[in-house]
Amino acid sequence: MDHPGFIRGAIRRLLIGPPIYYIWIGALLLLIFFGIRAYIGQLQAGLVVTGMTSYVSWGLYIGNFTFLVGVAAAAVLLIIPAYLYDFGPIKDIVIVGEALAVSALLMCLMFVTADLGRPDRVWHLIPGVGILNLPVSLLGWDIVVLNGYLFLNLFIPGYILVKAYYDKPVNYHFLLPFILLSIPWAVSIHTVTAFIYNGLVARPFWNASILAPRFLASAFCSGPALIILLFQIVRYYSRFEVKDAALFKIAEMIVVAMAINLFLLGAEFFKEIYSNTHHLSPLEYLYVGLHGKDRLVPWIWTALAFNITAFIIFLIPYTRKNFITLNIGCVLIIIGIWIEKGMGLIIPGFIPSPLGQVWEYAPSSTEIFVSLGIWGIGLLILTVLLKIIIPIELGELTVAGAEHGATAHRSHA
Amino acid sequence: MDSTPKTKPVVAGCADRESSSALPDRRTFLQGAAAVLGMLAVSSCSWEEFSQQHFTRMTKAELDRTTERLRAEYREKWGKEFTIGTEGPIDHTMFGYGLDIQRCIGCRRCVYACVNENNQSRDPQIQYIRVLRFPNGTMNLEQSELYYAPEEVPQEGYYYMPVQCQHCVNAPCTKVCPVRATWTEPDGIVVVDYNWCIGCRYCMAACPYQGRWFNFAQPVIPADQITTDTHYLGNRPRMRNVVEKCTFCIQRVRKGRYPACVEICPVGARKFGNLLDPDSEISRLIKTKRVFRLKEELNTQPKFYYFFAT
């Protein structure tokens, strides 16, 4: 093993980049700095510095967590065709998708930790020394599946990359069971996350069986949209080849997912509006406001407009295959789903409260800074992973190159 | 913009130790980093507290050591001697509660008796009992009013319904807890181990009765208002960022006393007793009066019965 050589090579890779790379890293470090500062304030004062109350006891942190689980789950979209059906163009690039999944998962874990009142007691979750309340606690299950998924997404690309680094062939017979396992596992992380909310009889907005399918459908919109953008950045700044055909294929999958997502939304609307029971109230709060409280209304209509616009853009082959409209569509989907599966899902669950009060929520500046800081850390992790993965994939960072004390190629801007 | 009550910040680390020294106006990053490290190394504050086990896992000796440590902490903070009971459930006992909705006048004496007895934070305020005021002719929760403030109660045209933890047989809150920090005792009381709760607030999302409260800030209780006769799973002082709730006054009822809310009620609307004893007041009123339970359709099976005495 040649760890020092690898570390030297990797560090050299991380230090070299075009000017915009330094601006990017600097901006992320700034976000992280303010995020950590805000989190320290939260640790010192307690969660009183957030906008959360006994009425709305989850907020921006759990909203971001939910959105990011979806992003992480979407890596499966790349794994299925890449490994099983040997769909050429995607196969080369699936590792990038897994790097995104790893970053998203780490952000998920950071968001739930930020939400915890007593992060000093996380050891209570470790079976044995602590108690992991299985099988009844869905949060317990979520911890299991998220960590399992994190392991798979580190192990599979890690194995391939180590082989590539040492210039050895990959033993696919060894790897195949892990790859097959990761497919249902990806579905499971978002399903279990949906079940966290879904199982609560106290919250009719979540206690509908449509929730898990909708989670999956929306995840398969936002995750791939992020991946399309990411691949364009990667291929612009490196010799990494991503064929247009692969990106358009991913965009086609998004159309299907968004169609299902919008259909399920319509089904939800019909059931609640036609039957017109008390369960309509959270939906009313979200879309038109309740008892004069309507803080989320502009947000959710923005989300709906963005999602429908993006759906139309992706549906028409001409706009789907034009990179300007494709990218606009991707941005619209990411924002649209972030609203819909973030605050648009969490907050109405608490409004009205189980005893009928309408108590609104808005994130405090602490929550906003901490959230931006976590996004900063996540994007920094993603950047670092890609800076190391891509040269290995391209054969620029290998054990042979490291032995010569120099990297083989210089990435071009 | 937000409605969160603001309180004076307290220094991180060990939960119960409140520092009165003001924080520096400008915190440098290094000081902040030191605070994080300090938080991670909770040991510097109290290794015993950090490493403390779940209530049901502690041996008698460990429990004694823990309560002794807590008593010292409370003594330091309030300058008083506390008793921290660890009495277990009484055999053949299943506690149940009855509330005469016809008699309740909405005076909220129960709310404040509970706050006093159970050492709930005065700032920010926590109150286990919510009294809902309904206009006559409906039991639609969305039409209920929590913050009614007339000169005099009861008011013409309204009736009142106090709601607190319903101590459900099929409790949605206990099963969601990822670390089993909350559970149902053999005598039917749903309790929380405040030193085991990780503060995820999943139980609060799960409760259909809003029976659970979170200490968003370090609880503040003036020394002259503190109740020193406590139970480990009941009214002992809590720390910030953990969940708490009504325990049927576990510190009282396991010694054969009534809960504070039952004692204070000026119209005798509140009843309490052993559901397993067919001759107890609660058993007899369930058998002979018209009773209902809140949100029966959710199958939570509360041990809290509303009834009409006449």
Image (spheres, coloured by chain):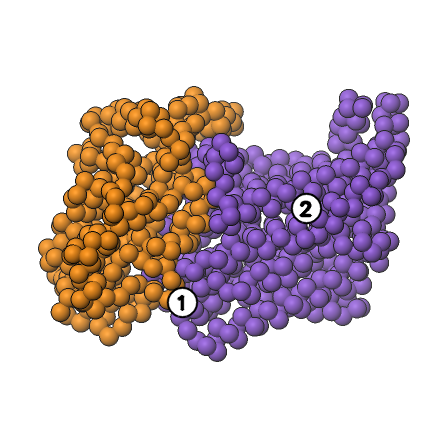
Give the chain letter at badge 2: A
Determine whether the residue tagged by mark 1 lies in a helix, strand or loop: loop
Question: What residue is shown at x 22% (from left), y 30% (from top)?
Answer: B83
Mark 2 residue element = helix
B173 versus A340 height, above or below: above
Question: Alpha carbon of mark 2 to alpha carbon of mark 1: how far?
Answer: 37 Å
- Name the mark on residue A101: 2
Tag 2 and tag 1, C-beta contact below 8 Å: no
How busy is the neighbourhood of tag 1: few (under 14 within 10 Å), some, or many (20 plus)? some
A65 sits to left or right of A350: right
Residue B289 in the image: above or below residue A13: below
Q: Please name the color used to draw chain B.
A: orange
Indicate left or right for B280 with B25 as reference: left
Q: Nearer the viewer, residue B291 or A344?
A: B291
Residue B166's quadrant in the figure? bottom left
Where is the C terminus of chain B found, in terms of image quarters? Answer: bottom left
The purple one among the chains is A
> Which chain does the residue under circle 1 lie in?
A
Q: Nearer the viewer, residue B70 or A278?
A: B70
Amino acid of disc 1:
Leu
Visible residue check, residue A77: yes
Which residue was labeled with disc 1? A290
Horizontal and vertical percent for residue A125?
Answer: 50, 38
